[in-house]
Image: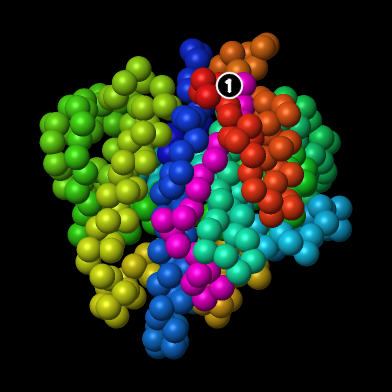
């Protein structure tokens, strides 16, 4: 979760873009998605009494924007979702992430593969600094933008919107994406505040002068604003790279899931409604999911997926030889990973190795 919106040319110094892939690694967007799906599935008819929630969801017609030039939908492909975390500075997010400018970037990008009829799932994280070939996309004014090489991945969202991100991911992976979900910073903050805060064990004191976050070592209960700063800080920990931040995100989100389970939120209709309300206000989906009915059905389809069996794998990347501040997909590892996702096959160990992280 980052607030860096500078152009690639303006960013100096090597930044880590990921960490060694680990079983059960999660991100805030996966937690929000899982919670929302579970809440909608468990609540059933309860939500029909809360019609205001349905109007919270924003939809984007991805299918119309992409047309027919897409990867084939294979019989064994299960469900494939593109989950984006937006760092937009618009509206409430301006106060949360610093600055009140329009636009934003795909701060977190995950391709989530849910095999048909199984309890396990895998999420492939695409580092934001990955250089990719962007296919031809449509600008906001309706004109076509020609394909471009060596484009920083998280700039695609800022310049051309979510449909172009979907098209770029499908082009680079060959994976047909069934749905798109985007969650913004404001929803993350509201979720934490709704459950009454999250306690984390701070391993070492944090003093981030840029965000103003100051935490002593030891157990600390964080509210929504503090939690957002905690998972986004990199200047106050380690060497100031993304590697330290990723470690904090993993720690925080494990604590968040623990807090949700401890409170047994699904047994409280009032709190369940509050969480669903705040989550849907922060949610943008493809048009097929942009209703409470569709999300409820989708949530029920995920009932068999145990979040504890969600494996997150970073796309194998290596530092770019021309620009060491950027990374590129490492071959043949990356192709092996996408092939396994497409064919619903076991992901080989080699596809989990990323030279940029030393493993």
> Compared to 165, does 354 lie above or below?
above
Q: Position of residue 147 (x, y in %)?
A: 82, 35
294 vs 69: above or below: below
Q: Is residue 25 left or right of residue 224?
A: right
Q: Position of residue 105 (x, y in %)?
A: 55, 40
Label 1: which residue? 355
Q: Residue at x 50, y 35 (%)?
A: 21
Q: Relative to residue 315, is residue 50 drawn left or right?
A: left
Quadrant containing the N terminus in the rendered view: top left
Is residue 301 on the magenta stretch? yes
Which class describes the residues within 10 Å of circle 1: few (<14), some (14-19), or many (20+)?
some
> What residue occupies the far right of the structure in this picture?
69
Question: Which region shows up in magenta?
Answer: 300-318
Please name the colour scheme applied to the rendered image.
rainbow
Q: How many marks?
A: 1
Give percent across and percent down for residue 352: 58, 35
State the residue at coordinates (74%, 53%).
Answer: 343
Q: Secondary structure at mark 1?
A: helix
Q: Nearer the viewer, residue 149 or 6?
A: 149
Q: Is residue 337 magenta?
A: no
The answer to whether one can see residue 144 in this image is yes
- For the residue pair 140 and 189, the one nearer the viewer reads as 189
- The residue drawn where x is 79% and y is 60% is 74
Q: Is any atom of residue 102 visible in this view?
A: no
273 relative position to 53: left or right: left
In which quadrant of the rendered view does residue 63 lie? bottom right
When the figure is inspected, residue 251 is found, relative to residue 287, above or below; the finding is: above
Give the x, y percent position of residue 163: 69, 51
Give the residue drawn at x 22%, y 66%.
Answer: 263
Q: Is residue 64 above or below residue 215?
A: below
């Amino acid at each position: 979760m980052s607030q860096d919106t500078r152009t690639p040319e303006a960013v100096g110094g090597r930044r880590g873009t990921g960490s060694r892939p680990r079983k059960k690694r999660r991100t805030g967007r996966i937690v929000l998605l899982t919670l929302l799906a579970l809440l909608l599935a468990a609540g059933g008819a309860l939500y029909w009494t809360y019609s205001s929630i349905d109007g919270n969801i924003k939809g984007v017609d991805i299918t119309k924007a992409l047309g027919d030039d897409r990867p084939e939908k294979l019989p064994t492909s299960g469900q494939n979702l593109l989950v984006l975390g937006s760092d937009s500075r618009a509206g409430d997010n301006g106060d949360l992430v610093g600055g009140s400018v329009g636009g934003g970037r795909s701060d977190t990008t995950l391709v989530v593969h849910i095999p048909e009829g199984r309890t396990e799932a895998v999420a492939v994280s695409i580092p934001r600094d990955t250089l990719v070939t962007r296919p031809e996309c449509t600008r906001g004014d309706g004109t076509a933008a020609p394909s471009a090489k060596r484009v920083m991945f998280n700039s695609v969202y800022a310049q051309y919107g979510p449909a172009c991100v979907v098209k770029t991911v499908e082009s680079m992976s060959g994976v047909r994406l069934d749905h798109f979900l985007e969650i913004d910073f404001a929803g993350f903050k509201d979720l934490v505040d709704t459950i009454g805060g999250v306690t984390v064990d701070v391993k070492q004191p944090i003093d981030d002068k840029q965000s103003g976050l100051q935490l002593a070592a030891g157990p600390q209960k964080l509210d929504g604003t503090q939690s957002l700063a905690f998972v986004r800080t990199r200047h106050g920990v380690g060497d100031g790279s993304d590697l330290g931040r990723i470690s904090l995100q993993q720690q925080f989100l494990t604590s968040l899931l623990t807090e949700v389970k401890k409170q047994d939120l699904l047994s409280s209709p009032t709190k369940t409604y509050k969480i669903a309300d705040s989550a849907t206000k922060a949610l943008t989906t493809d048009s097929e999911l942009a209703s409470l009915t569709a999300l409820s059905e989708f949530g029920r389809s995920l009932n068999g997926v145990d979040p504890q069996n969600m494996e997150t794998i970073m796309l194998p990347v290596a530092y770019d030889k021309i620009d060491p501040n950027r990374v590129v997909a490492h071959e043949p590892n990356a192709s092996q990973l996408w092939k396994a996702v497409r064919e619903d096959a076991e992901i080989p160990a080699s596809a989990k190795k990323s030279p940029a992280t030393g493993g």
